[in-house]
Image (cartoon, rainbow, N blue to C red):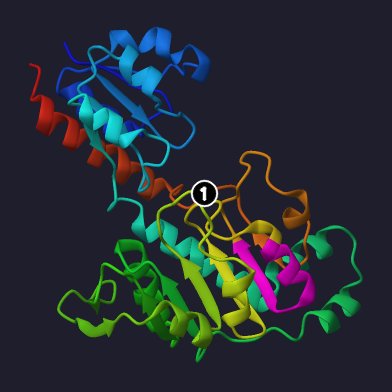
């Protein structure tokens, strides 16, 4: 029997598919420091972002056939070492694209109308009339330009939403020259509108965008530092739902304080789960606790996509 450890959990829809294939699924959370001593019993390890799959764990997983990551990135898995041991490594690039794109757009709305601030201040006793005056300077995002850094599945979903909102698009991706963005209104399957968007230089996207949103894997070093921020429009808004460290946090904080960056929407941070207090408390930051893929729908899609890949590789164990 195939034994699976879903160490960071799996949606019931995915678990059901695996159990219907007669696999044994455990969701008992094994602490990181104990995982190497217990992984030897399992054929498949499923993780999210919490569990780190290191060389030590891979070496201890003598029965491991598959390491599956629920989500897009694989930076918490030693990918090359796992592959060198003949272990299949899967992620779920399709399942959560819309969820992440909607959260990125949600931060744009929050920042443009200062929802994050007015909501808090009204709940904590702020004077209604003063707050009404204070927050009457919000703006509409129709007609603004969104720069999309990383024009894969998530970036293209952002483009679909932005086009529907009447925003301009600037996109950059070294691996994508152009993409056809198709929009089918919900409930009108016989209607489809599409536009081809060509990607542009990194520098042009930085210079011309009112909002810049990032949808790229982590590389271990920041893509955006003080040098790149200096290229941007004064009053730009930055959105990061990709990976902590894509933006150098100290440089972002300086730019927020100077006003060169008008606001930031942050779902990911360098030191999770204890992010920079200065960023969390900054009045120009809209923040969420790494929930980009955490919708009911996306978690179901992730669980089922993982199950399909595992069953496809291992076969039905009936």
x 22%, y 32%: residue: 83
- Please, which residue is most extreme toward the bottom here? 143
Give yes or no for residue 260 being in the magenta stretch: yes
Is the residue 190 above or below the residue 303 in the image? below
x 73%, y 63%: residue: 253
Quadrant for residue 302, please give it. top left
Secondary structure under tag 1 reads loop
Quadrant for residue 54, please give it. top left
Q: Please state the horizontal and vertical placement of residue 51, each as a whole percent of the image.
A: 46, 29
128 relative position to 297: left or right: right
Q: Please state the horizontal and vertical placement of residue 109, each as a whole percent of the image.
A: 58, 73
Is the residue 126 above or below the residue 234 in the image? above
Q: Please state the horizontal and vertical placement of residue 133, each as a whole percent of the image.
A: 85, 84
Is the residue 64 above or below the residue 219 in the image? above
x 7%, y 16%: residue: 318
The answer to which of 248 and 181 lies nearer the viewer is 248
Which portion, as a residue range, is magenta? 251-265
């Amino acid at each position: 029997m195939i034994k699976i450890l879903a160490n960071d959990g799996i949606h019931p829809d995915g678990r059901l598919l695996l159990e219907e294939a007669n696999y044994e699924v455990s969701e008992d959370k094994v602490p990181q420091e104990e995982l190497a001593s217990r992984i030897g019993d399992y054929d498949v390890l499923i993780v999210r972002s919490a569990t780190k799959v290191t060389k030590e764990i891979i070496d201890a997983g003598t029965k491991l056939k598959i390491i599956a990551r629920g989500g897009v990135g694989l930076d918490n898995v030693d990918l090359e070492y796992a592959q060198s041991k003949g272990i299949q490594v899967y992620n779920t690039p399709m399942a959560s694209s819309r969820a992440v794109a909607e959260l990125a757009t949600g931060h744009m709305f929050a920042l443009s109308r200062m929802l994050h601030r007015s909501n808090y201040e009204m709940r904590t006793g702020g004077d209604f009339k003063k707050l009404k005056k204070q927050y009457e300077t919000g703006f509409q995002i129709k007609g603004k330009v969104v720069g999309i850094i990383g024009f894969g599945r998530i970036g293209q979903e952002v483009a679909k939403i932005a086009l529907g909102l009447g925003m301009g698009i600037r996109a950059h991706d070294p691996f994508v020259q152009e993409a056809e963005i198709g929009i089918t209104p919900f409930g009108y399957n016989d209607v489809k509108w599409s536009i081809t968007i060509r990607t542009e230089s990194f520098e042009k996207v930085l210079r011309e965008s009112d909002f810049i949103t990032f949808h790229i894997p982590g590389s271990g070093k920041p893509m955006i530092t003080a040098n790149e921020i200096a290229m941007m429009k004064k009053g730009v808004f930055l959105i990061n739902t990709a990976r902590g460290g894509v933006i150098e946090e100290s440089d972002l904080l300086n730019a927020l304080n100077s006003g060169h960056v008008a606001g930031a929407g942050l779902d990911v941070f360098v030191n999770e789960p204890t992010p920079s207090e200065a960023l969390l408390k900054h009045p120009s930051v809209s923040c969420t606790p790494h929930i980009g893929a955490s919708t009911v729908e996306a978690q179901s899609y992730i669980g089922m996509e993982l199950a399909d890949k595992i069953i496809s590789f291992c076969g039905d164990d009936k």
